[in-house]
Image: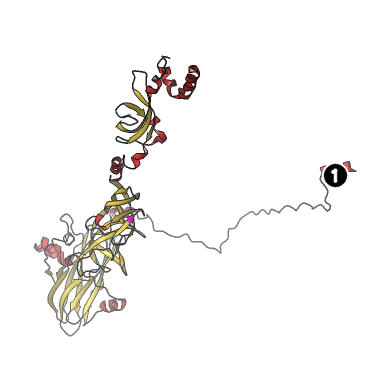
Amino acid sequence: MLTAVRCVFTKLLSPLWRSVEADGGGAGLFSGAAVLEDIRHLRGSVVTQWCADYGMIDDAIYFTNAEVLGGMPLKQGDLVNCIAVRDGSQGGWKALRVEKSADAWEDGGKSSLESDTMQLRPLIGTITSYDGEGGYINQNTFFPRHSLSEGYEPMKGDWVQAKYVINPNQWTTQAQSVAPLRYSRLDKVQVTSVYGNSGVVEDTVFFSMDSLLLPANFQPAPGDFVNLVMVESTQSFYNWRALCIAPCEKSEKPSVKSFSEVDLAVLLENKGGLDVSTYGNFGELMMGEKREMVMWIQNKGLETQTLKCCEFANWDSERQFSLVNINGSKLVQQKPPSREADTAPPETAPKEISATKELEKENGEESQESVVGSRREERDVEIPPGQRISITVACHSKILGCCAEMLLLRFSTFTIGRRLDVTVGSEDVALLKPAVPYVPLERNPSSALIYDHVITVSAPKEPPKLTKRRLPSFLQTSRCLRL
């Protein structure tokens, strides 16, 4: 009877002690009640040590990832249930199976679970909705208004970086801090267009009045020069959105005078018996080159006319044109601290100088201040009948391409304008010009090619069609066999 009971226990417990028996060299692990002492079923044990792929339970039982049921990731402090076996009578304990305790998801493992859920995790995404009190990132991470960085007003489409936590009760995510992913600043840029409640700056930056920070009593309009701070955002065709806009100083924004076609034609006409030089083309200049032009105003009438003011219409934003002298009187103007474009660099010298300029050089009257010139000059210069005065205008090339400006000569009762043009190039651009001008190939459709020898090829005749249809040979053979 005892032998039969021992045989049954051996078959039941063979999967557990077979490896131990092999290691022990056949010492006989199973010897009566000793088997029950070498195998333990433990519940509610604690993982006291954990490394990359192995650990210790209760500082006594060794286990690896291979013994963890379902490959569940464990960490120090987790509650587990395990089956352990002793490696010989004097050896250590090794786990055969490790299972995370079900109580760990309720109360026992609450500390480790809370440490996971309260850990801040980084997130990069886009604002998918925002109603003023809160919104969502990537449609699933909620953020309240107090989590936004100071001064940031989000808008749908903005790229943001956030820190979020996981709510263990509802398994939802909530952002604790939200800030723009990338931002930049632009100064002295022009408002391109405004459509209702939105607009565009420099054809690249979108803005909306709903989320735009503006100073008091300022509304951006087309043509305004502004400073702005922009954030990366996906807004239709634009990748940047203006967060705040402020106007530039008045000195930085020249007043541009525009004229209709009718007004421009009237402005260019001679008036009051005055005859003003009509030429105003400076021709082609290289970058950094300077050229001067003398314009004459002759009084062919019977009354004395008084020139009150000379100025420009500010068509040229780079201010390449300036007034040098009026009737031989030099115009002196100090260099403005905010505009470096009003003064020519010391290494650039004029290429062409008028007769008046050469006379001043001979007399030693030229100074660096006279080269600066002026954009506007107010003085009363009388022009008696039959007399004339000269106005010297200079052009200092600063930007490539064609440029135009309008010179306004204001008299007591009328204004006469003259258009100034210049084309600025560079040595690099000159290398791209073709060696010879393009001439299209002339084709005369009426002229036909004449050949000395002509060969006529006739098409082959069509093969004759069979009047009778005959069966294939194999069909005729089968028909004969049937007969």
The answer to whether 476 appears left or right of 137 in the picture is right
Secondary structure predominantly adopted by residues drawn in magenta:
loop
Q: Quadrant of residue 315?
A: bottom left
Q: Is residue 119 magenta?
A: no
Q: Is residue 264 above or below residue 54?
A: below
Residue occupying the far left of the picture: 364
Query: Foreground: 446 or 97?
Result: 97
Indicate the position of residue 246 as horizontal and vertical percent values: 21, 64
Indicate the position of residue 334 as horizontal and vertical percent values: 11, 63
Q: Secondary structure at mark 1?
A: helix
Residue at left offset 53%, top offset 63%: 444
The answer to whether 444 appears left or right of 408 in the picture is right
Q: Which residue is mark 1?
A: 476
Q: Which residues are magenta?
A: 136-140
Q: How is the image coloured?
A: secondary structure
**Badge 1: residue crowd in 10 Å (few <14, some 14–19, many ≥20):** few
Q: Amino acid at mark 1?
A: Gln
Residue at left offset 47%, top offset 19%: 6
Q: Is residue 27 above or below residue 265?
A: above
The answer to whether one can see residue 363 in this image is: yes
Q: Quadrant of residue 49?
A: top left
Query: Which quarter of the rendered picture does the C terminus lie within?
Result: top right
Q: Is residue 137 magenta?
A: yes
Indicate the position of residue 306 as horizontal and vertical percent values: 15, 79
